[in-house]
Every structure is written in C-alpha cells, then in structure tokens.
Image (tube, grey):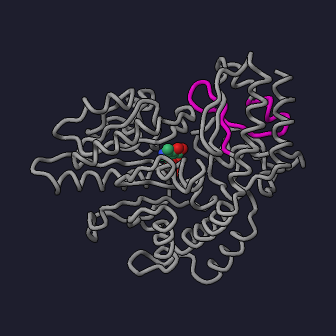
Amino acid sequence: MSDTLKNLDKNYVLNTYARNYVNFTTGSNATLKDNTNKDYIDFTSGIGVVSVGHGNKQVADAIYKQVNNITHMSNLYAIEPQAMLAKKLQELSGYDMATFFSNSGAEANEGAIKIARKYGETRFDNKRYKVITLAHSFHGRTITTVKATGQEKMHTPNFSPYPDGFSYNKHIEDIYNSIDEETVAVMLELVQGEGGVQPFEKSEIQKLAKFLKEKGLLLIVDEVQTGVYRTGEFLASNLYEIEPDIITLAKGLGGGVPIGAVMTTHKDIFSPGDHGSTFGGNFLSTRASLEVLDILEVQHNSGKIKEATEYFQTKLTALFNKNQAIFNKEVGLGLMRGLRVKDVETLSAIVNSAFEEGVLVLKAGKNTLRFLPPLTITKAEIDSGFTRLENAISKI
Ligand SMILES: Cc1ncc(COP(=O)(O)O)c(C=O)c1O
C-alpha cells in the first residue's frame, strides 16, 4: 500500500472534521508517539474520553478476557456486566436511579429527551413536551440533540426541519420566566464544555433544582463531559449537591470503548418497546466500563486524582500568571480546565505551536484553550506537557 494516511482519509472518509494528519501509532497513559517516533503529551484524552490513559493494561486485559468469550449477544437476553454496571453507577453516584445504555453522548441525550417527553405525556393533565436548554450548550449531533444545543450556528437550514419543543435561555435566571404550561424539563451541563469550560454557580443551580422539583418538572443534567470524576467527584451533580431526575454520561465512562448511559429516578417510565439499541450495553462495552470505574474509584479514593488535579492546576496558574498578555481568565473545574485567550488568532497559533512542540491541547468556544488530560496523568507527564506548552507560547 503506497497510500499515505492523508490520501486514504481524504479519498475514503467523509469530510466532517478539519483534521490534523498526524499518524499516532502508540500510546501509554498521557503519552503518544506518531509514526516518525515523535512523542506528544496528551492534554486532551481524545476530548475527555481516555479517562484511564492510553494503552491501559488492566482495561485491555478485561476486554480481551470478555471478547475471548462473548463480545455481543442482544438486549433480548439479560447481560451480566450491563446489570452490574447499572448497579455500580447507582452506588458511585449515590442516586437511586436505573440506567439505559447507549453508544454515545448524543444517543444518551436522545434517551433523556424521550424519558422527559413520556413523563410530560403521561404525568400531567395537559401534554408537556418542551425542553429548555441554555445558550452556549452542546448536547450532540443527531437532529434532535443539535436542536437541543443552544447555539444558533448549529441549526443550519441544511438539516432542517428540526423537531419542535426546544427553546434557549441566555442565563439560568431567565429560565423561571420561560417555563410555560407545556414545559416538561430543563437540560443543562453544570460546566459547559464545548461552550468554553464554563461552570455555573452552585447556588444558582441548587435554586433551580429546588424550583423544578417543587413544580414536578424535570432537571436533566448532561454529564457526558463532566461525569466520571472529570470535575473531582464521580458526577458534577455530586459536587453541586443536587438530585437531578435524569443524568446522561458517555465520554470517560468506557475509557475509549464507545458507551453512553442515561440514568433516571423514574425507573418505571419506560415499557418494553419504548426505547432500545442493538449495541447499547453489550458485553464488550459494559465489561470495559466496569474495569474503568474500578480503576478510577481506587484512584479517587486514594486521593490520586485530587493530587494530579492540584498539580495540574498549579502549573496552569503559573502559565497563566506568566502570560498575562495572552490569557484573560482561568476557568473550569477538576481536570476540565481552560484559559481564555485574548483573541481567536492567538488561540489557533497556540494550539498549532503546541502540536509542533509535542503537547496536545484543545479549543473550546471562541476563545478558550482547553485541557482535558487523562485522570491518571502523572506528575512527570504534567511537567513535560507544561514545559512544551511554555516553549510553544514563546514561539508564537
Ligand atoms: C456535554 C456534551 N453532551 C453531548 C455530547 C455528544 O456526545 P457524543 O459525541 O458522544 O455523541 C458532547 C460531546 O462533546 C458533550 O460534550
């Protein structure tokens, strides 16, 4: 085969991403190598997915053992690791919830919206189906979750018509006056990821949660990015000390194996036939996820995630202080961090220069340099990543 990766990709893969044509060939925790043997410190973890690092031996062994027996059967039969994982999610979150497993974050949010709509259809005298979301939110790429996303640029006529029933508020405090007799739920991220690594105020969220509970309306928390220890606790909802009605997860849950989950306190909302998925919750993904959660639970309880977070934060603050002409503000929670950059051009220049220096970083929103390292990142990897980033910044 003489085709380069770039040619292969350009000729055979649909054009949905402005790709960087690096060819990563090996990975170990937060360190990657490409086919020229150049190494990179990964401060992205595949956009918050590889929570336990690249090439995790414990997860690899668990997957190997599982696929050597049964990779997939179907949801027509009970699946032991799926049931165990649902129990584990309840235990780790502390929420008395049952779970449906999907294959992605968008699909988990679709499930959440279906739960809310059935609740709105069956639990009130009048039909309630409207879901309020927030400006700068991101909830996925399916037709419905694109519409749920509070960014006008995502609602392009190319894919219209979109489903009805979504409206957007700029601020949390605007939600109270937007609720009408057809509203059934509010859906939000506690830290807006794609929107700019922007956390909401705890008191504001607690007030909203209490208000919705009193009205019998649902609070859906999209924890696709914030979940699975990303913000320090198992869920950001734990950190905010709220009790949502519905929570969605994906990204870090499978450590790279595609899996999503929608958890709800309304355990009896669905009946057979209401919802389903061929792959969702199969032997492979749920076994992998059980192993990921075992690893992260130990890391969390031993204080290792906190230690890595504090170390990362110290380095980030030092970088911020040293480069006041470039950065305006530090944002984020846990190992979901950002630096607001003074302008878009500088942000792109930093990301590109960082790549050249061998450290991978992300953009979020218009002007945020974003960091989502593996939760298992070592101090040596953090040191190396920040040294490279300093060099990158000095060269722009
Ligand atoms: C908060 C949030 N919700 C939903 C999604 C969509 O998840 P997926 O790409 O797995 O469908 C994302 C992805 O970035 C996200 O950050």
Query: In the displayed structure, would residue 87 be above or below residue 264?
Result: below
- Residue 21 x/y as whole percent: 75, 40
The boundaries of the magenta stretch are 351-372
Residue plotted at (80% across, 58% down): 28
- Residue 155 x/y as whole percent: 40, 31
Report whether residue 158 is seen: no
- Is 114 positioned to the left or the right of 331 in the image? left
Q: Toward the viewer: 5 or 387?
A: 387
- Tell me the quarter of the image containing the N terminus: bottom right
Outermost residue toward the bottom in this view: 69
- Is 130 positioned to the left or the right of 317 in the image? left
Report whether residue 198 is seen: yes
Q: Can you tell which quarter of the image residue 19 is in?
A: top right
- Tell me the quarter of the image containing the C terminus: top right
Q: Can you tell which quarter of the image residue 69 is in?
A: bottom right
Does the magenta run of residues contain 186? no
Q: Can you tell which quarter of the image residue 78 is in?
A: bottom left
Residue plotted at (47% across, 50% down): 237
Query: In the displayed structure, would residue 335 be above or below residue 84?
Result: above
- Residue 284 x/y as whole percent: 57, 72
Does the magenta run of residues contain 356? yes
Q: Toward the viewer: 135 or 236?
A: 236
Query: In the displayed structure, would residue 131 be above or below residue 223?
Result: above
Residue plotted at (19% across, 35% down): 180
Outermost residue toward the left in this view: 125
Residue plotted at (69% across, 62% down): 299
- Is 233 positioned to the left or the right of 43 in the image? left
- Residue 386 x/y as whole percent: 82, 37
Outermost residue toward the right in this view: 37
